Amino acid sequence: MKFISIISKVVIVTALVLGTTSCSDDDDNIITPPVTLNVVETAQANTNLSKLVAALLAADGDLDTVLSGTGPYTILAPTDTAFDTFLTDNGFNTDLSDVPTDLLQKILLNHVISGTVRSSDLQSGDGTGYTNTLSTSGPGDTNLSLYYNSNNGVKFNGVSTVTTADTEATNGIVHIVDAVIGLPDVTTFVTADPNFSRLLEGLTAYSFDYVTTLQGNGPFTIFAPNNDAFDALLATDNTWNTPGDIPEATLESTLNLHVASGSNTTESDLTDGEFNTLGGGVLIDATAKTVTDGSDPVIASTIVSTDVQAANGVIHVIDKVLLTSIPQ
């Protein structure tokens, strides 16, 4: 009944607008008010978003009612084709019946941002950055991060591009996208964010299985050196042009020092003292936001960004590569 009621409302509003437009032919001074629908009604009015509407109705959480509320919400709306691809790639039936309703809720909420975010907002500054979605699929029910890059069209998490932007609604805004944005693991952000391209080269060098490991359940806490950090390390040896030029054993022990397994340690959970990683201990100064290794001379790396949250762990960005664990 709720679905029929919304459709009826759309038909009535459309009829009124058509009637007003017809009358305006006789009086140019009459201004036709814009048709404004909420974000759910906007999706229902678009025949290319029928599977999104069906998913909202099928998922846990009564999402169609929630997203018809005050908001405001920014909706990244995958097309029917996007849903078909997602369902096929993940071994589900194309009618959504194979997708567990709780998982469907988590995925759909990963397409919802609190507030009204227009394409111009995403293009400010250098056109890249992170925001949070309403999906609480991170460890401990933490909200997932979403990476956006607007330098060549607006793309989310490196996989989903906006094809139609800035459709206004009464309680937010809708951007139509060409791919479903799955629940990210920590490697999703390493791959999507070009600031981690050097780290990605290191993780995929030699016969390392870091990518497979970091796509697992975790949870993981990662201190991720940015490109400047790796470039500074490579500059210390004129035979090193990429992380793959660093001797395998050295690179492996170095990477291990940046990954902790078994915890999703967000910024609020960081405390002063030793923090154990796969490569040994490092020292955290939570107030100064630094991570210090045990090299000679010791490297104090500043945590320049925190809490990039994936479904299986969290990333903190650092500005220097850690080399050696602290002495025991």
Image (spheres, rainbow, N blue to C red):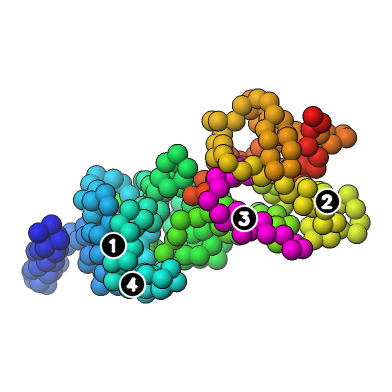
Which residues lie in the magenta part? 205-222
- Please tell me which of labels 4 and 1 falls first in the chain: 1
Q: Type of residue at label 4?
A: Asn
Residue 278: quarter of image: top right
Mark 3 falls on what kind of element? helix
In the rendered image, which residue does mark 3 sit on? 213
Q: CA distance from mark 4 to mark 2?
A: 46 Å
Q: Position of residue 161 (x, y in %)?
A: 47, 66
The quarter in which the N terminus is drawn is bottom left
- Please tell me which of labels 2 and 1 falls first in the chain: 1
- Please tell me which of labels 4 and 2 falls first in the chain: 4
- Please tell me which of labels 4 and 3 falls first in the chain: 4
In this view of the protein, which residue sits in the foreground, 313 or 143?
313
Mark 1 falls on what kind of element? helix
Q: CA distance from mark 4 to mark 3?
A: 28 Å
Which numbered disc, 4 or 1, marks the residue closer to the eye?
4
In the rendered image, which residue does mark 2 sit on? 250
Q: CA distance from mark 3 to mark 2?
A: 19 Å
Q: Is residue 198 magenta?
A: no
- At x 55%, y 47%, the residue is 218
